[in-house]
Amino acid sequence: MSAVSPSKYNRIELQKKGKKPVELKGGVVAVDYYESLYSPTVTANVMYMDAGGNLEDDKNKLTSVKEALPITGLEDLFFNISNETGELKFIKKDAFKVSKAPVMTRESNRQAVLLSVVSPQLKQNNDDPIFDKYKGKISDTVKKILKEKLKISNDKLDIEPTKNGYNFLGKGRGGLDLVLDLCKRSVPVKGDAGFFFYQTKSGFKFKSINELVSQKPEFTLVYFGGFKQDNTDGGGNDNKIMIPPRFEKDQDVIKSLKGGVYRSRNIFFDPRTFCYEEVTYDISKEGVKKTLGGAPPFADDVKSFTKTFHHILDVGSLDSNPSTEINNDPREWQASSVMRYNLLHSQVVHIQIPCNLKLEAGNVIKMEIESTSANKEEGAKDEQQSGNYLILNLCHHFTDRRSITSLTLVRDTYGIKRSKD
C-alpha cells in the first residue's frame, strides 16, 4: 500500500461533558492536521456529514449530532489516525477542544459540519492569567511555566538549555504567550540567539534555531521525473515530491537590507546614567554559527549599517535593593536574533508529498531537485536549489480517497551542505 492511499480512522470521537462519546469516523469527509514553528499549539479541522436521526436529544427526539449534544464549543475530540508511516494520536488529556463548528452546507436530511479544534492548552492559556514574578535562567522559567501553569508532563516537554537569564513579571498574560515572548530574548549555550516555541504530535518544544539547523536530515525527498499513477503498491513514490516545488521566496536582498540582516546599528540607552552606547553588528565579522548550507550570500557586499535598532536597558527595575546589573543584556541577543530569524527565511518553498506521519515541524529534510541543464547526466541534481531545508509548516490532509502531506520549507543559504561544512 502507498502512503498516498487513504489512512485509517481508528478513532474520531466527540464527547460533551456529562454525555456519552459520539463516534464520528463513519461520516468524516476530510481531516486536516496542522503544525508550525510559529504556533505554540497544534490544530486540526474535521469535516463530517451530520445526518438527521443519528442521535437522540434530551427530549428523546432523533436528530443530528450537532443539535442533539448540542455542539456549542469546548467539547473533547478524541483523535487517532494511522497509516504505514506512523500514527497521529490525541486522546485522554491530549484530546482536542472544539473551537467552532459552523455548518458549511445543508440539505433536507443532512448537513456538512466543520469542526475546528485546538489543543487544550490554548484554552488554559486564556483561562489562567499569570501575575507571578520569574527570575533565573530562561529555559528553567519556560519549564516551570509549562509544568506548573499549563500542567504539561515531562514526557511531553523538550526544552533546550539557555545560556542567559531574565527577570520579569507575568502581567496577566497566558503561559503560552509568555514563553513565545521569551524566544527572541533567549541565547543557546552554543550558537546565535533566537528560539522557537511550538507543539508537534510528540509534545512541546523550545528549541534554538542553531539546534534546529544542526540536525541531520530525517528523510530525502526527490523531484525527478514523473509521479507514477499506479500507487497500489507504493510504486517508489513515497519519497517523491508530487507536484513541482513552488518557491514563494528565493532571496529578497532589498528587504534583507532594510531589515538589517547583514549590518545593523544598535543603540542602547542606560536610564541610570543617561548614557548610550552604539554597537554595529556585522554578519561578515560575527559570522553565523550553523547554517543549512554554505556561508550566507551577500554578507561581504554590505559596507554600512542598513537598519538602526533602539533599546532601553533594564537596570535593577525588578530588584528590591538598588542594583546596577543589567537584566538580560540585549547586547547579547537583540541584533543576533533579528539576523537569525530573518536569515532563516531567505528561501521559502512549498511542496506536497505522500502522507508521512513521521515528519514533524522543526525536522530537517534533504530535498533533491532535478537539474534543468541541457547537458545533464541522468539523475543530476540542481546544485543551488537542492540541499537541506527546515520544516516551517506542516499539514497532513486525509480523505476517503488519499492521504498527503503539505510542507512549507525554509533555509538560510543556498546549495548542498557538504561534510566539511
Image (cartoon, grey):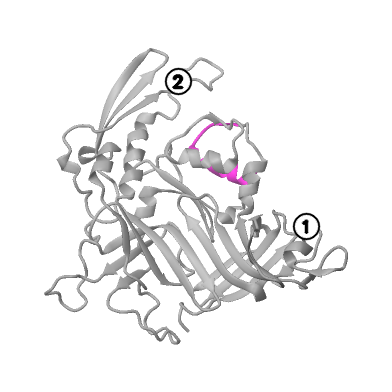
Residue 201's image quarter?
Answer: bottom right
Residue 143 forms part of the magenta stretch: yes
Give me the residue at 67% from left, 70% from top. 107
Dot 1 or dot 2: first in sequence order is 1
Give me the residue at 63% from left, 61% from top. 115
Q: List the residue tagged with mark 2.
A: 315
Residue 222 placement, left or right of 136: left
Give me the residue at 15% from left, 70% from top. 373
Tell me if mark 2 has few (under 14), some (14-19) or many (20+) residues whose alpha carbon lies within 10 angstroms of its own.
some
The overriding secondary structure of the stretch rendered in magenta is: helix
Q: List the residue tagged with mark 1.
A: 17
Give me the residue at 83% from left, 65% from top. 57
Tell me if mark 1 has few (under 14), some (14-19) or many (20+) residues whose alpha carbon lies within 10 angstroms of its own.
few
Relative to 53, say whether 127 is above or below.
above
In this view, the residue in front, 407 or 211, is 407
Q: CA distance from mark 1 to mark 2?
A: 50 Å
Range of the magenta residues? 133-148
Give coordinates of residue 178: x percent, y percent: 54, 38
State which mark lies toward you, 1 or 2.
1
Residue 42's image quarter?
Answer: bottom right
**Outermost residue toward the right?**
59
- Residue 159 seen anywhere in this rendered image of the structure: no
User: The residue under label 1 is which amino acid type?
Assistant: Lys
In this view, the residue in front, 83 or 115, is 115
Residue 91's image quarter?
Answer: bottom right
Q: Secondary structure at mark 2?
A: loop
Give coordinates of residue 266: x percent, y percent: 31, 28
Give the quadrant of the C terminus: bottom left
Give coordinates of residue 74: x percent, y percent: 69, 54
Q: Secondary structure at mark 1?
A: loop
Residue 106 forms part of the magenta stretch: no
